[in-house]
Amino acid sequence: VGALAALLDMDFEVLTGLVEDQFKGKDRLIQPNIHALELGHDWARNHLECPLGVRVEAREGPRDSILLDGNTALGLGAIYGGATVAAWYPITPSTSVVDAFEKYCKRLRVDPETGRRNYAIVQAEDELAAIGMVIGASWNGARAFTATSGPGISLMSEFLGLAYFAEIPTVLFNVQRAGPSTGMPTRTQQSDVLSCAYASHGDTKQVLLFPSTPRECFDLGAKSLDLAERLQTPIILMTDLDLGMNDHISSPLEWDDAREFDRGKVMTAEELEAGKEFGRYLDVDGDGICYRTYPGTHATRGSFFTRGTSRDEFAIYTEKGEEYEKNMLRLMRKWDTIPEHLPAPEIIESDQDTDAAVLYYGTSEASSREALDYLADDGIYLDAMRVRAFPFSHIVREFIEKHERVYVIEQNRDAQLRTLLMTELGLAPDQLKPVLSFDGNPISARNIRKQIRRYQEGGDITPFHRENIAIRGAGDSA
């Protein structure tokens, strides 16, 4: 670092100040580290041409912003959202979510009088055990979550089906990386969209949230715990390595201390004592969401058997086709009401009339917005939409149907969000044009601009990475 400071003509006092901040409270480490900086700095000045043609100088940063990574924001969001239980199996790039949760629990979840820890963190033997512990804790009335990445999603899928079918609140933070299999663990992608949307066998659909900034990781991390209990279903928050592990300039985190947790439809002991009818899978409000009870709510009423097998409205086992069908249709009725509870998509309209648009999500936002500016300079004007959740709002369908062409920007090979849009909304493939990047690096505005310009000029839809591979395969060993 000292040598780099000499090469880039950095203000050495800035570095010494950072060392003092880093080791505050450990004064005996400050001077040795400053001395190491000085040794590197002096060596570079004596043996290398310093400074280089570029230099780094200190500037006043934006005072209304902070530097924050998405995983830390998720850990904080879980705490503010009321989580007291985390169970996980370490996997890159999600491990630091639980690390952050533990770090801040030690500050915020310890009784100041007794020193008692009001939280539980369990490193499970594998991902199956981790999601099982979360489901069990949530069933028992705690707010719980797990964090994983693509390989963990594969292992957790059967339990996600149980949580969907038995309707147990479950929160999962998926920090995506490049797959399949082990893939590139230290590279980013958005390649788990389909595996999460339809996680588990049979007719299952899972709720997905797509944050694009650390602030949204915090906000949606907290909100996911409310949504899981309100909707009584798994909530999968889809971030990625780029957002999760890298520092980003973010607006400051905010929390309303008057905010109350949404525990959803929970029948109380008083209601049971008064004779209110209870059926765990009895839809009394017509929205597909039924009342539940916490274990031990009442000595003789409100109990039920939680099972992954078929059952009737009172949780009694049955294999009668009509009872099974009734339950599955109720789950679909609930699914149809879910979008009204989810974050709405964001729309940016072009200054000029246009019949074309872009649609993006997650960490593709910043580069997509930048590409829109470049394209406008080229005379190509596009409306834009950022999708923030699945199932899709009716606003998504209406936006797409307003345009002749919609470029769907995403960071995977197989255009997974485009596939989801076609499957769920019945849209024509020719209307949705894939704009893809999947080399493990964050998608760039330059890449987006090139692909959209090629479409506009009537070119083919081969993503550039595939084209480059085809060229190399034709005789270039590089």
Image (spheres, rainbow, N blue to C red):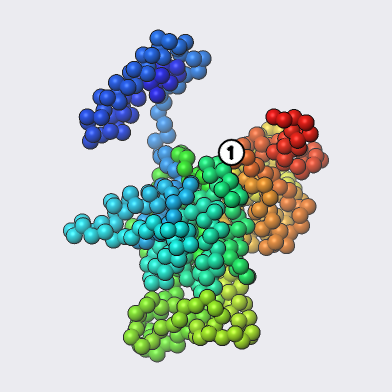
Observer able to see residue 80:
no
The residue positioned farthest toward the bottom in the image shown: 275
Q: Quadrant of residue 381?
A: top right
Q: Position of residue 379 (x, y in %)?
A: 72, 35
- Of the 4 image quadrants, the one containing the C terminus is top right
Observer able to see residue 133:
yes
The residue positioned farthest toward the right in the image shown: 458
Q: Quadrant of residue 42?
A: top left
**In the figure, 310 relative to 99: above or below?**
below
Residue underneath mark 1: 441
Q: Residue at x 33, y 60 (%)?
A: 120
Q: Position of residue 153 (x, y in %)?
A: 54, 57
Q: Residues within 10 Å of mark 1 (few under 14, many from 20)?
A: some
**In the figure, 358 relative to 32: above or below?**
below
* Viewer-nearest residue: 64 or 129: 129
Q: Residue at x 38, y 76 (%)?
A: 294
Q: Residue at x 34, y 83 (%)?
A: 298
Label 1 SS: loop
Q: Residue at x 47, y 71 (%)?
A: 168
Q: How many marks?
A: 1
Q: Position of residue 296 (x, y in %)?
A: 34, 79
